[in-house]
Image (cartoon, rainbow, N blue to C red):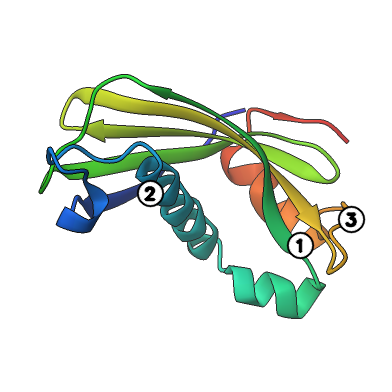
Amino acid sequence: MMHENFYHKLKVYYEDTDAGGVVYYANYLKFLERARTEALVTLGFNNRKIKKDFGALIIVKSCNIEYKISAYLEDELNIRSFVKSITKTSFIMDQFISRGEDLLVEAKVHLVFVNSKGKPIKIPSSLFQDFKPYFCDSIKI
């Protein structure tokens, strides 16, 4: 099954960098979060709507990130995101940050749907149906 890529562009600002003008490593996690949020929005959802309509939150269970090349002040970055696989309660999203043709960061993020008490819950069926046809390589029910 083909997956759809979601792209999010951003510019590196002074606040994103260290004293040398290099993006501080932890800020890449913020960049990835913004891109994941925008990917959800393209499906017609946002975190507030998911909480209101389903009583659920999407939390990061784990993140494996590999830093390859540094980004610098005022760089124009592009973040490519797609859902790699889905289970009943979670999904894996692959994300890549690039500058032009250069791959800077590669990340695999495991996200889980939880209720207000932090317990894993099934992904709401309407969300699951939106994920399924668009951009998943594998689905495990």
Q: Position of residue 50 (x, y in %)?
A: 69, 70
| Up-down relation of residue 140 to residue 55 (above or below) | above
Which of discs 3 and 1 lies nearer the camera? The answer is: 3
User: Where is mark 1, residue-wise?
Assistant: 126
Q: Amino acid at mark 2?
A: Phe
| Up-down relation of residue 28 to residue 107 (above or below) | below
User: Where is mark 3, residue-wise?
Assistant: 119
**From where the camera sits, is residue 4 visible?**
no
Q: Secondary structure at mark 3?
A: loop
Q: Amino acid at mark 3?
A: Lys
Q: Position of residue 138 (x, y in %)?
A: 71, 28
Q: Earlier in the sequence, mark 2 or mark 3?
A: 2
Q: Position of residue 120 (x, y in %)?
A: 87, 51
Cα gap from disc 3 to disc 1, whole angstroms: 20 Å
| Up-down relation of residue 6 to residue 56 (above or below) | above
Badge 1, how many Cα within 10 Å: few under 14, some, many 20+? Answer: few
Outermost front residue: 19
Q: Residue at x 17, y 55 (%)?
A: 13
Q: Which mark is residue 31?
A: 2
Frontmost residue, 75 versus 46: 75
Cα gap from disc 2 to disc 3, whole angstroms: 26 Å
Residue 108's quadrant in the figure? top right
Q: Earlier in the sequence, mark 3 or mark 1?
A: 3
Q: Amino acid at mark 1?
A: Ser
Cα gap from disc 1 to disc 2, whole angstroms: 27 Å
